[in-house]
């Protein structure tokens, strides 16, 4: 495969600044709904980039589980590498990429832990097997082999036999409080539309267009 030959012209639609909602959260919801209507697999998957204690960026995918209170919510293990990063440096970046719609959204902001009530409420909605995995997996820690992981899962499954599985103490969530958004719509000849929102006075947002 010759990667230098892999390219595509983007022709689907345009995104004009006049059509961009004055509220970036409303715009985010519109694009999320478009992704859902298009039946994109895991349209709520987003890349989360943190910075570790050595200043090294670290990106991985997490699932968006809510847009509330000026931020975007996701859930994870609070002893994981990403959680350690966020404790040291709460500033982080989120990115959605929907190739089928030729769209990308970049968001930066600061992550704050979600309250226990929110975490437990969300945990109760998860499939039982996933709840057990949250107990069995010391996320980001080395594990000797697959078998050890499966045995840990089986032990927890036995322990919670016939009972509800509570949220583990090491399981929680974060809300990235958004400080800047960029909506990218692919256009012909690489003249893409890039509409950026920066915070302005009185809790409003200032829209501007960036060169592609
Ligand atoms: C589609 C997809 C969805 C994922 N969703 C989550 C999630 O919501 N929470 C999570 O902790 N990890 C999720 N993961 C796993 C993470 O990408 C990552 O492997 C894990 O959180 C450990 O990251 P860390 O060691 O940097 O903390 C997901 C991975 C993929 C590919």
Image: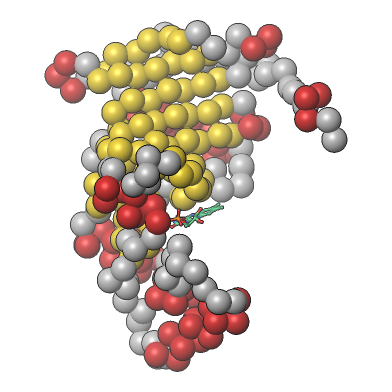
Report the front residue among 136 and 72. 136
What residue appears at the point 50 percent right and 48 percent down from the top-left corner? Answer: 61
Vertical position of residue 54 compared to residue 117: above or below: above
- Mark yes or no: residue 118 visible: yes
Residue 70 versus residue 22 in the image, above or below: below
What residue is shown at x 83% (from left), y 30% (from top)?
A: 2
Q: Residue furthest right?
A: 1
Colour setup of the view: secondary structure
Q: From this viewpoint, is residue 130 visible?
A: no
Position in image of residue 105 (x %, y %): 47, 29
- Residue nearer the viewer, 192 or 87: 87
User: Which residue is most to the left?
Assistant: 202
Q: Residue at x 49, y 81 (%)?
A: 153
Name which quarter of the figure residue 156 lies in. bottom left
Looking at this view, is 40 or 149 the one in front? 149
Report how many numbered discs are placed on residues in the image. 0
Q: Could you tell me residue 100's position as x and y percent?
A: 65, 32
Q: Residue at x 64, y 12 (%)?
A: 190
Q: Quadrant of residue 147?
A: bottom right
Q: In the displayed image of the protein, which residue is found farthest to the front? A: 54
Instruction: Tell me the quarter of the image containing the N terminus.
Output: top right
Where's residue 140, x and y in %?
Answer: 45, 62
């Amino acid at each position: 495969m010759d990667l230098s030959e892999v390219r595509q012209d983007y022709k689907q639609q345009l995104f004009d600044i006049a059509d961009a909602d004055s509220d970036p959260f409303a715009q985010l919801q519109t694009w999320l709904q478009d992704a859902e209507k298009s039946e994109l697999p895991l349209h709520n998957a987003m890349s989360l980039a943190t910075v570790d204690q050595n200043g090294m960026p670290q990106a991985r995918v997490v699932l968006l589980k809510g847009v509330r209170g000026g931020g975007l919510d996701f859930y994870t293990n609070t002893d994981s590498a990403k959680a350690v990063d966020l404790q040291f440096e709460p500033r982080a970046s989120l990115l959605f990429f929907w190739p089928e719609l030729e769209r990308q959204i970049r968001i930066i902001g600061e992550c704050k832990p979600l309250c226990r009530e929110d975490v437990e409420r969300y945990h109760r909605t998860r499939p039982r097997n996933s709840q057990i995995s949250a107990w069995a997996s010391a996320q980001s820690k080395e594990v000797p082999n697959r078998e050890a992981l499966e045995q840990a899962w089986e032990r927890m499954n036995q322990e919670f036999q016939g009972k509800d599985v509570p949220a583990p103490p090491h399981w929680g969530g974060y809300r990235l409080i958004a400080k800047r958004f960029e909506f990218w719509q692919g256009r012909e000849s690489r003249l893409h539309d890039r509409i950026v929102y920066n915070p302005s006075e009185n809790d409003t947002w200032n829209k501007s267009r960036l060169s592609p």
